[in-house]
Amino acid sequence: MLPEPGSPLVDAIAPATPGCAGATAQNALGLPQGFGCDIGAAEAPSNAVLAGHVTATHDGAPLAGIEVRARTATNTYATATTTAPDGTWTVTGLPAGTYKVLFRDPTGDYHQTFNGNAKQFATAPAIATTTTNTTIVDQSLAAANTVSGTITDSVTGDPIPGAEARLRNAADNTFVATAEANGAGVYTFTNLAPGTYKIAFRDPTGAHTQIFNGSAPGFATAPPIPIAPGDTVTIDQAMDPVPTIGGTITDTASGLPSPASTSASATSPTTTLPAPPPPPTAPGPSTSPRHLQALVQRPHRRPPRRMAPRQTRLRHRHPHPPHHHADHHHRTHPHRLRQPRPLRSSPP
């Protein structure tokens, strides 16, 4: 029986097989001819096969239990398997085409890597497969690095839950990752690439002063932390509480606490400052008891104004008695002499 056109079956006998001339694919309706051609045994599925071996980069030891995921050229899932105890793996049943392979350690002890030691899908080289050959893809994985430690209060020694550890590249001070301390003050960075780092420690509540590893006040003076493949590094750090200044505000006259007085925080030692001296009194008006009494009784009135003594106006008295003769008046005041009125004639 001949295979149908488009059948996934191909002639599994190599073209150079003795006694079998021609190795035309059966799905092209061409059969090999010869006594050495066993038609039933020659048919096999048209599967692309990917296989390989996964080892550790630092010592070459085989790695078991590594997840191997084949993805298409468009980054869609195709198939997956895990490595055997000797680090070998094989996937079958793939249509011929182009693939990329992701290697992942579920335990986190080794870095996730694409084929060709690529860190991401876009930069991984494409793997072309055929239905006649098994494509070998070997890969080594670098051991993941771990940096961890405990963040505590420098005065009490208590852990600081929620404190942040910020990992920065020691070469250019670029940000790498952030880890938050748990209830015991422990932070952890995992799956780090080998390199040199520095760590900044920060309390989001503002109760502690920011500090770098090695108790350095800034990035420039912090000691670098070298990380080699497979390293597990512990960096503990104590943070200083933010200093506070406290005291009591009192009224200058009564000495009693002012309603606006504040008390010091109990998170750190406090310093009590003495009360400042009263401000000097500016010179003002007279403070005699009489003047003060006037100010108290009339607080909104201006103080009395002092006036010069009033001059007495003297009037000239006439030397003559008020009743004097007309002729004397005429002599003394001729312009005030009253003229006699003319007599009116009687009507006829």
Image (spheres, rainbow, N blue to C red):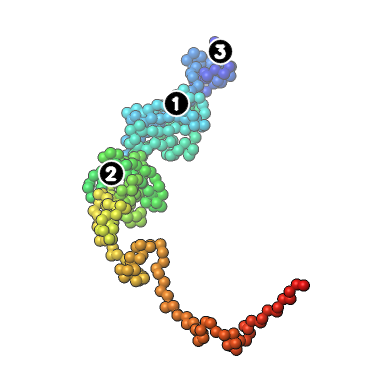
What is the x, y in percent for residue 211?
32, 51
Extreme left residue here? Answer: 156
Asked if residue 191 shows in the view, the reply is yes
Quadrant of the image containing the N terminus = top right
**Which label is found at residue 191?**
none
225 or 88, which lies in front?
Answer: 225
What is the x, y in percent for residue 94?
48, 24
Quadrant of the image containing the C terminus = bottom right
To which residue does mark 3 refer? 2
| Residue type pointed to by label 2 | Ile
Residue at 51% across / 14% down in the picture? 39
Badge 2 or badge 3: first in the primary sequence: 3
**Which label is found at residue 160?**
2
**Which label is found at residue 79?**
1
**How far apart, in angstroms, are the residues tagged by discs 3 and 1?**
31 Å
Residue at 45% across / 38% down in the picture? 120
Left or right: 266 in relation to 74 = left
What is the x, y in percent for residue 251?
28, 58
Residue 132 in the image: above or below residue 304: above
| Residue type pointed to by label 3 | Leu
| Residue type pointed to by label 1 | Thr
Residue 23 in which image quadrant: top right
Extreme right residue here? Answer: 348
